[in-house]
Image (tube, rainbow, N blue to C red):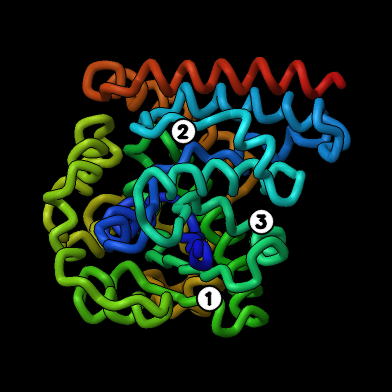
């Protein structure tokens, strides 16, 4: 029998890829790199109409398969499109996503699947309606370090203030979920994972009702970790042993203005989640002019990161193909 699904939720650049490759080592857990089906197709789903209609469900599945074909971390598993249509449960976008995950699980020979698309924080209720026993690991990281990491990643906002706003919104959602999900959700601090990896992974395994396996701490030796490290600089740490000093980098990496923009935006949530502020007195929220300047600066940083990705990332053009596909599907479905 397939065990209850596992979801890693929170904000990107919080260690979700690291946790994915650690858990993927487990003999019973299959967590492939996600094509982010729910993130990309949830806004488009209304354009497909009533998915209990087999023809409409087939159209959606065809487009989701196109996303998988352009996946920036190509899967080694061939997904049977007809089986997805037949086995989707329920006949919704989430059902299509789950049917695809189950085929990948079947190919792995393991017992339960997981998804590290942190954007699933927006779809927890739907996931629980389908699988009441689903487990959610809320991965939390200091927003100032998230901002440092995001500024160098092609997958994230660039200016620290924009990262701080996204972090604040998504942590607020996760905090509300924690209050009502009880034993279905575990909060895990990235900093604690770095400081005490075995203790924290044992805690995660207990939460998942799985045995701890020592090989999980040797994740960097696995093909999945090494593949990701080669494909993109944004994932290069998955191919390295745990970086215990990968916390507190904001102290030297952020300017005083950038630090102020993060703490002004995320300060209240930092207090709630136990991340002490650095600045006193507290900075005021950025003005409209500040935000315009941050947006302009973010665009300039994006250009630089894209140029570096072009020369260093093996999946650069796959990422652009994905962007083109979703842009085209957005125009096509948005008008229906």
- Residue at left offset 39%, top offset 46%: 32
Residue 298 got which mark? 2
Q: Secondary structure at mark 1?
A: strand
Which residue position holds label 1?
185
Going from N to C along the chain, the mark reached first, 2 or 3, is 3
Residue 200 percent across, percent down from the top left:
28, 77
Name the one closer to the observer, 258 or 182.
182
Q: CA distance from mark 2 to mark 1?
A: 34 Å
- Percent across and percent down for residue 82 are 63, 29
Dots 2 and 1: beta carbons under 8 Å? no
Instruction: Count the labels in the image.
Output: 3
Mark 3 and mark 1 in contact? Answer it, CB < 8 Å. no
Q: Determine whether, in the image, residue 242 is placed left or right of residue 63.
A: left
Say if 159 sits above or below 60 in the image: below
In the displayed structure, 193 sits above or below 103; it is below
Q: Which badge, 2 or 1, is on the more N-terminal residue?
A: 1
Left or right: where does residue 77 sit relative to residue 271?
left
Rate crowding at label 3 as few (under 14), some (14 to 19) or many (20 or more) other CA atoms within 10 Å.
Answer: some
25 relative position to 176: left or right: left
In this view of the protein, which residue sits in the foreground, 168 or 277?
A: 168
Q: Is residue 309 above or below residue 166?
A: above
Gap in angstroms between the C-alphas marked 2 and 3: 28 Å
Quadrant of the rendering where the C terminus is positioned: top right
- Residue at screen point 58% across, 39% down: 37
Residue holding disc 3? 123
Q: Residues within 10 Å of mark 1 (few under 14, many from 20)?
A: many
Residue at 64 percent of width and 24 percent of height:
63
């Amino acid at each position: 029998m397939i065990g209850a699904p596992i979801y890693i939720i929170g904000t990107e650049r919080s260690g979700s890829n690291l946790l994915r490759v650690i858990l993927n080592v487990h003999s019973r857990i299959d967590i492939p790199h996600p094509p982010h089906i729910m993130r990309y197709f949830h806004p488009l789903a209304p354009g497909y109409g009533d998915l209990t209609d087999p023809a409409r469900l087939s159209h959606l599945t065809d487009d989701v398969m196109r996303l998988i074909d352009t996946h920036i971390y190509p899967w080694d598993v061939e997904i049977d499109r007809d089986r997805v249509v037949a086995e989707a449960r329920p006949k919704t976008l989430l059902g299509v996503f789950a049917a695809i995950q189950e085929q990948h699980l079947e190919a792995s020979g393991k017992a339960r699947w997981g998804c590290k698309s942190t954007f699933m924080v927006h779809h927890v209720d739907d996931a629980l309606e389908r699988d009441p026993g689903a487990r959610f690991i809320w991965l939390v990281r200091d927003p100032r370090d998230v901002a440092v990491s995001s500024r160098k990643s092609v997958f994230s906002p660039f200016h620290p203030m924009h990262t701080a706003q996204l972090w604040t919104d998504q942590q607020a959602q996760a905090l509300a979920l924690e209050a009502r999900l009880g034993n279905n959700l575990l909060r895990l601090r990235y900093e604690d994972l770095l400081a005490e990896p075995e203790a924290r992974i044992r805690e995660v395994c207990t939460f998942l009702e799985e045995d701890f396996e020592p090989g999980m701490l040797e994740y960097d030796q696995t093909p999945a970790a090494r593949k990701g490290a080669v494909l993109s600089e944004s994932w290069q740490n998955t191919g390295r042993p745990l970086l215990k000093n990968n916390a507190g980098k904001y102290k030297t990496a952020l300017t005083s203005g950038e630090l102020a923009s993060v703490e002004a935006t995320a300060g209240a949530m930092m207090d709630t989640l136990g991340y002490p502020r650095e600045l006193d007195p507290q900075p005021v929220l950025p003005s409209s002019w500040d935000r315009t300047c941050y947006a302009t600066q973010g665009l300039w940083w994006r250009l630089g990161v894209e140029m570096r990705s072009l020369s260093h990332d093996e999946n650069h053009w796959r990422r652009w193909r994905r962007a083109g596909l979703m842009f085209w599907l957005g125009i096509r479905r948005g008008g229906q």
